[in-house]
Every structure is written in C-alpha cells, then in structure tokens.
Image (cartoon, grey):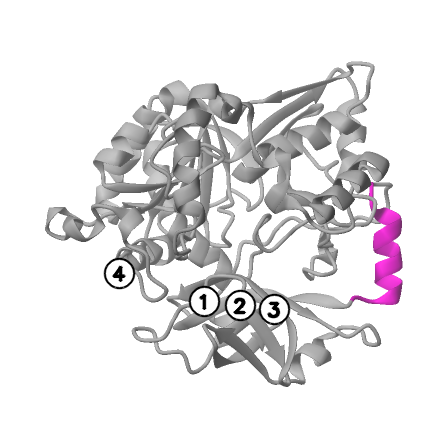
C-alpha cells in the first residue's frame, strides 16, 4: 500500500512516476470494463485465476466470462475456420488456427493446456509462419488502434510534429514509424503515422494502448478546436496480406501496379468490387506484404475474394503467434512487452527515428542521452544449448547474466523457425560507472536462466542476417 501511495502522490504532483507502472495503470482499461454485469461475471473468476498456477499464456485470455465484447467483422468466418482466440482490451483476435478435424481434439480447451515447455500449437504456428515467410497468408489485425486527425490548415501538422520524434511532414501517401515521447525521452506511444492528405492523417498504434494514447493526444491537442481527433478503430477492418506472393495475389484482384508500390507508402485502391481501401506496403514484422484498411461493411467481401483467388498461391489464415514469432526473430520491439515509458529510441538502436531539425517533446532529454551515452540496450539472444522438446521454454521475465553477473530480464521470447533456436529479446544494463556500446555487448559471455537452469546465449545487437532483407521503416 505504501508503494502504491508513493506513485499516486507522484502522479498527482508531477503527472508522472519515476518507474513504469503500466501493469497497474488505469489506462489499460476501456469504458466497456465499467459495465456492472461484466464486472459481476468477471469478478467471480478472478480469485481462482489469481491463485492458480501461472502457466505462460502468450496472449491467451484464460477468462471465460466477458468474452466477444469486441470482434471484427470477420469473427464468425474466422471462428468457422478454426481460429483460437485471445483477448486484448476486450478485443478478440486470432492467435492461431486449429488444424483440420483430424487434429482438432488437441485444441478443444486452451484454458486447460498449460505448459512450461513445447505447446500443442507448435506445428500449427510453424505452418502459418512458413506461409508468411515463403508464400502468402492473411492476418486479421483489426484490433489495432486507429485515430483520424485532420484540420483546415497546418495546425494538425504542427501538432504531430511536436508530439512525434520523427519527421511526419512528408509527401501525401508516406507512412512514418515514430515514437511519441515524454519529457524524459521515453516512449508514450510507438506508432505509424500515415499522411492521407495535406492536413489529414491516420495514426495506428498497438491494441492495448487505445485508452492511453487517446489520453496523451487529448492532453496536448490545442484548445481552440482547430484539430479534429477521432477514434476510427471500428470503422476499418485491417487485413495483413503478408508474404512474398502477396503482391501477385493482389495484382489479380486490383488494377494497381504492386511491383512499383513503394515500401512504407499508402495508396487508396480497389480490390475486386470494393473501392476506397487504404493499402500500405508494410506488415509490422519486416516481411514483405500489404496492410489493407477496409471499410468494415465491405470486409467480408474482400476477405472472401482474397481466400478464393489465393487458393492458387496456397493462401492460409495466420494468427498473432506467427506474427509475434516473426517480429521477435527480426528484433522488432513491442510496446507493453519490450517498450515502456522509460525506454528511449537510443535504448532500442532507433536513433534513425529521431529528427533533430525540429522541436518535439523529449528532444532535450535525447540530446543529453546522445552526448552522455546509455546504460541499457535492447539485445536479441539465441539460446545455444536449449533442447526444444524437453527443456522449459522462455516466455518473458527470465534473468539474463553477463559474465556471470545479473544484467537484465527477457522481455519477449519465441522459438525462431528460421534461426532454428529459442530467441529472446531483452535489455542489458551496465553498472552506473559504465556506458553500453556495441563492444560492451559483444565482448562478454551470456546466460539466460529458465526455471533455475542456465542456458548459453549468443547476443545479437542487430537483426540476424539469416532473416534476409527487411522492409525498412521510414527514417527522417
């Protein structure tokens, strides 16, 4: 209680806290969570879950009550295709797709399949992963938070330039990946900003950050009502058409030239019978492909056309687990897992996401960090002596040891199907007397402790070359 009181006092006095308090932050909820009937049902489950054995869930909600509150237009279709759903901020999203009838018995009740090792869905996720890497797959990413911002003049441009560390004043049709930082240079939001018109933008950010991000935007929006700000998450169904064959599939359904469709750009296209679809050449995993933002009433039509035309390309549905593995292998951090408000672009080796030729919140803190150096850095680790079938798996929270000394924790983990090893992401911290450099990371031996057993870990400061070319994020 004393600790909670301390941080509440800091919030009242400073509007911020010295430590990341996201696990107990009120902004991790939405208004739907205040519904009395929802609370009556959900609260009956909580005591049992609180004191039950905590198996790794990888994003699976084990609650049975209060489900299907928020679903995409494709939910019945994907459920019929075998989707195993998890829940984020009340939104149901496919984690993976169960195999055909012959193999479905192993997946009947996910809440009773806890394990600290290799999960039953391993081979299913591997199939989906391979489609994303070598063929074509569709991932329903509708749960992503989407905001529309526009104005009658440059006020919306100036507003976003002040909030974003990267330069968003780019030509119409440009997609910019950027952080919105606090005064200490830490991430309040990790997002993509799409310029749809001269004074018209779409902002896309993680599902779990919906309430938090709207609060941040409203806190800084001008009081003169010059900027229109709206949550348009429900207006668009977001489909990730991912894989090297994605451009060939879309070429059969649209008159656009997808070979010349530049990466990190956006165009308004037609797909089949449906017009006014925002297509962006990015996938949030580094693989080639396209994000389609479809007016929700047309989503089922577009999905059916993709799946029918895609039969010739071996198209399949894929879920969050496959996407998660892809981003971990490519060393892509995720807000809420690897990133919090104390993490800066320099900690993530993302200085190319900073545009110092303009003013923005957190600029002074980053300039100081650039001069003084950093004491923690985001690193990828490959476990060298881990036995896939018999050893316990990492999932997050495992301690990292540098030359036998504790130096940080794992923040994300997955088995890498391309790298052929368990892949862990985490931060290496240096003692107060030292600064972290590439040589500091590479010039040491590492171990990761999983259930009291230490495994040798090989560090990567940059994305492994085995992953091949990546879709670069737009720089300043």
Q: Give the mark nearer the N terminus: 3 vs 4.
A: 4
Q: Nearer the viewer, residue 159 or 31?
A: 31
> Depth-wise, is mark 3 or mark 1 nearer the camera?
1
Q: Is residue 250 magenta?
A: no
Mark 4 and mark 2: Cα distance apart in space:
25 Å
> What predominant SS class does the magenta segment belong to?
helix
Residue 226, percent from left and from top: 78, 16
Q: Which residue is mark 2?
A: 398
Is there any visible trace of residue 243 in the rendered image? no
Is 355 displayed left or right of 301 in the figure?
right
**Which residues fall within the magenta stretch?**
361-374
Q: Give the mark nearer the N terminus: 4 vs 1.
A: 4
Residue 173, percent from left and from top: 61, 34
- Asked if residue 326 is positioned above or below residue 386 in the image, the reply reads above
Viewport quadrant of the N terminus: top right
Can you name the residue that lies furthest to the front here?
A: 1
Secondary-structure class at tag 3 = loop
Q: Nearer the viewer, residue 155 or 403?
A: 403
- Asked if residue 55 is positioned above or below residue 298 in the image, the reply reads below
Q: Give the mark nearer the N terminus: 3 vs 1.
A: 1
Q: Which residue is mark 3?
A: 462
């Amino acid at each position: 209680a004393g600790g909670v009181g301390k941080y509440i006092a800091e919030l009242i006095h400073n509007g911020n806290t010295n430590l990341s308090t996201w696990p107990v932050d009120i902004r991790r909820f939405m208004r739907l969570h205040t519904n009395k009937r929802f609370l009556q049902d959900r609260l009956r489950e909580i005591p049992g879950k609180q004191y039950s054995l905590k198996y790794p869930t990888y994003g699976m909600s084990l609650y049975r009550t209060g489900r299907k509150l928020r679903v995409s237009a494709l939910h019945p279709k994907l459920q019929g295709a075998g989707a195993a759903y998890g829940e984020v901020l009340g939104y149901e999203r496919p984690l993976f797709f169960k195999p055909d009838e012959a193999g479905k018995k192993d997946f009947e009740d996910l809440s009773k399949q806890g394990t600290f090792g290799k999960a039953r869905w391993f081979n299913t996720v591997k199939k989906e992963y391979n489609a994303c890497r070598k063929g074509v797959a569709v991932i329903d990413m509708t749960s992503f938070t989407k905001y529309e911002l526009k104005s009658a003049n440059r006020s919306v441009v100036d507003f976003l330039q002040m909030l974003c560390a990267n330069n968003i004043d780019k030509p119409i049709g440009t997609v910019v990946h950027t952080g919105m930082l606090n005064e200490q240079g830490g991430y309040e939001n990790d997002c993509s900003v799409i310029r749809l018109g001269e004074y018209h933008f779409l902002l896309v950010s993680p599902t779990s950050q919906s309430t938090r991000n709207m609060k941040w935007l409203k806190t800084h929006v001008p009081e003169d009502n010059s900027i229109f700000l709206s949550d348009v998450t429900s207006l668009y169904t977001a489909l990730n058409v991912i894989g090297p064959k994605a451009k060939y599939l879309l070429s059969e359904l649209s008159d656009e030239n997808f070979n010349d469709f530049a990466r990190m750009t956006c165009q308004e296209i037609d797909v089949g019978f449906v017009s006014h679809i925002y297509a962006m050449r990015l996938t949030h995993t580094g693989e080639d492909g396209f994000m389609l933002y479809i007016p929700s009433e047309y989503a089922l039509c577009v999905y059916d056309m993709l799946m029918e035309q895609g039969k010739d390309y071996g198209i399949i549905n894929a879920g969050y687990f496959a996407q998660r593995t892809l981003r971990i292998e490519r060393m892509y951090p995720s807000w809420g897992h690897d990133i919090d408000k104390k993490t800066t672009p320099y900690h993530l080796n993302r200085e190319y996401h900073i545009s110092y030729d303009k003013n923005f919140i957190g600029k002074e803190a980053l300039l100081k960090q650039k001069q003084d150096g950093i004491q923690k850095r985001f690193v990828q680790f490959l476990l060298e002596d881990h036995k896939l079938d018999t050893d316990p798996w990492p999932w997050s929270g495992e301690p990292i040891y540098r030359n036998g000394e504790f130096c940080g924790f794992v923040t994300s983990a997955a088995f890498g199907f391309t790298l052929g090893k368990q892949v862990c992401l985490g931060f290496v911290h240096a003692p107060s007397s030292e600064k972290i450099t590439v040589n500091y990371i590479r010039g040491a031996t590492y171990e990761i402790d999983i259930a009291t057993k230490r495994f040798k870990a090989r560090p990567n400061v940059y994305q492994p070359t085995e992953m091949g070319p990546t879709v670069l994020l737009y720089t300043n």
